[in-house]
Image (cartoon, rainbow, N blue to C red):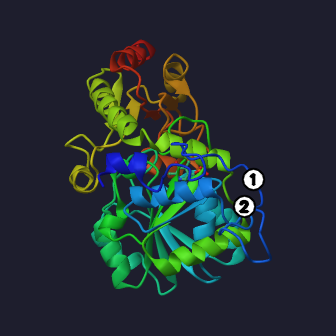
Amino acid sequence: MKFETKTIHAGVVPDPSTGAIMTPIYQTSTYVQEAPGVHKGYEYARTQNPTRNALENNLAALENAKYGISFSSGLAAMDAILKMFKPGDEILSTNDLYGGSYRLLTKIFEGFGLKSRFVDMQNAQDMESNFSPATKLLWIETPTNPMLNVVDIKALVDIAHSKGVLVCVDNTFCSPYLQNPIDFGADLVTHSATKYIGGHSDVVHGCVMTNNEEIANKLRFIQNAAGAVPGPMDCFLILRGIKTLHVRVQRACENASKVAQFLKDHPKVSKVYYPGFTDHPNHEVAKKQMRLFGAMVSFDLHENTFESAKKVLSNTHYFSLAESLGGVESLIGHPASMTHASIPKEERLKVGLTDSLIRLSVGIEHIDDLIGDLDKALS
Ligand SMILES: *Cc1c(COP(=O)(O)O)cnc(C)c1O
């Protein structure tokens, strides 16, 4: 089945009791048993729910995985993955990790003895020396937020596997339409489905996909034992969002490439971060592992101050000032004061995250309106 068909059909069958073409929302907490232990495979809704099952099978198919396990948020999915490890184990991850993931590793799991280290992953050949005997998991994010660096999944998987280390890719920024890390050997893929997979900014959800049965069983156990499960209505909304995933992401990527070019040509803009440019430092890697170059664009201003960024941020109309990304509507954000405010200024500046850096999540509105909006805000 091709991706565009999977989004609509994988894991989804007409409801056996009525023929309803859309998966019903099984809004129930428990299931009646005929006699003790005699039931239709459903006992209690933390453990199993038909709406969730349909979603999980669909999600697995989107990442070319055998197993999909879903959670109440992207961070709940990460939390479940980290619970597979033990005190003394070390997680190696990127130094421009999503802030919430950084917080979970350092503020929660370090307290339970799980160690974490954050390194630059842009040059795979420099990664060898970063592994220690305690390293058990390599956590990759690509493209990164908000600098849109791209890391070579295949090269990093090869190094990690040669050391017996598992690899998890947070694929949120790409969505499964653009990039399938399992095809490059990753052991686990996770998403904040709150973003592109849901796609309509109306639900918080997370998931993990894997081909490894042992990992799937562990995660399934944690899902039930720790209980961070999504509700059936949320599962329905994600399933509904997925049906247009390919169409939405394709249009958003087309718009983003035009927005990036417009910004590059604008006299007030000093730099545009977008993996689709041939002069982006990781353009070749992006071309190798992504179908399109994504719909996230960051840019900086010649006038390098918070004040000048503020002027742009408060003068767009279609680009709404908000955290998050991946919805049908375009968003604009200021990483230094919003998503990355907790990172010390010297640290931020080292990676190019200045006070005037602006991040866009380009949506699927008409391109003329989007460019007109930015043009006005920059004038
Ligand atoms: C939003 C996000 C998360 C966290 O997901 P939630 O659904 O908000 O819990 C994790 N990783 C990335 C890259 C994100 O953008």
- Residue at x 46% of width, y 83% of height: 132
Q: Given contact means CB atoms under 8 Å apart, are the residues at marks 1 and 2 in contact?
A: yes
Residue 338 numbered mark, or none: none
Q: Is mark 2 within 8 Å of ligand 1?
A: no
Q: Is residue 179 left or right of residue 11?
A: left
Q: How many marks?
A: 2
Viewer-nearest residue: 355 or 121: 121
Query: According to the image, label 2 marks what residue?
Result: 45
* Residue 296 seen in this snapshot: no
* Residue 264 seen in this snapshot: yes
Q: Quadrant of residue 372?
A: top left
**Other-residue count near label 2 (Cα within 10 Å), few / some / many at <14 / 14–19 / ≥20:** some
Q: Is residue 124 left or right of residue 133?
A: left
Say what secondary structure mark 2 lies in: loop
Where residue 122 appears, as percent x and y from the top left, is 33, 60
Q: Quadrant of residue 227?
A: bottom right
**C-alpha separation, residue under disc 1 versus residue under disc 2:** 7 Å
Query: According to the image, label 1 marks what residue?
Result: 28
Q: Where is 215 relative to 59, above or below?
A: below
Quadrant where the C terminus sits is: top left
Amino acid carrying mark 1 in the image: Thr
Viewer-nearest residue: 235 or 297: 235
Quadrant where the N terminus sits is: bottom left
Amino acid carrying mark 2 in the image: Ala
Say what secondary structure mark 1 lies in: loop
**Other-residue count near label 1 (Cα within 10 Å), few / some / many at <14 / 14–19 / ≥20:** few
Q: Is mark 1 within 8 Å of ligand 1?
A: no
Where residue 89 appears, as percent x and y from the top left, is 57, 81
Where residue 42 appears, as percent x and y from the top left, is 68, 66
Q: Earlier in the sequence, mark 1 or mark 2?
A: 1
Hey, which residue is sitting farthest bottom in the picture? 133
Where residue 344 appears, as percent x and y from the top left, is 59, 50
